[in-house]
Amino acid sequence: VQLQASGGGLVQAGGSLRLSCAASGSRGRGSIYVRGWYRQAPGNQRDLVATIDAGGTTNYADAVKGRFTISRDIAKNTLYLQMNSLKPEDTAVYYCNAVTKYQTYWGQGTLVTVSS
């Protein structure tokens, strides 16, 4: 599976961005049972932002609850992250992933910069 993330950019605090992650190619063995967004700020580890499983159940990091929404378009094989009320501390490279029983696939990352 190849994952292509897009939609990052520079935005002022309080603004919004929508990230997209398009999946293509063969996934090999196993079905994708969860997809997610993670982020990594400079000098920090990669942290969970949000996930959505095959049944549509979502999970969010406490830091983004109420501001970010994860969704997917199954027909387009695309994952989204709507980010509202952005804060400078949301600045990071955002990565999408797709998880099967056998492997985790990662996209290349898209940079989100929130200015104060």
Image (cartoon, rainbow, N blue to C red):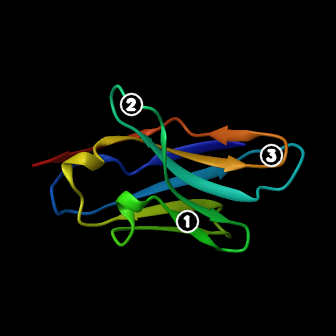
Secondary structure beneath disc 1?
strand
Query: Is residue 73 shown left or right of residue 14?
Result: right
**Residue at point 25%, 47% (across, down):** 89
Seen as rendered, the residue at the extreme left is: 116
Marked residue nearer the N-terminal end (3 or 2): 3
Question: What residue would you read off at disc 1?
Answer: 59
**Residue at point 38%, 51% (across, down):** 7
Question: What residue would you read off at disc 2?
Answer: 44
Marked residue nearer the N-terminal end (3 or 1): 3
**Residue at point 68%, 40% (across, down):** 105
Contact between marks 3 and 1 (CB within 8 A): the answer is: no
Seen as rendered, the residue at the extreme front is: 62
Mark 1 Cα shell of 10 Å, populated few (<14), some (14-19), many (≥20): some
Q: Amino acid at mark 2?
A: Asn
- Front label number (3 vs 1): 1
Give the number of marks: 3
Marked residue nearer the N-terminal end (1 or 2): 2
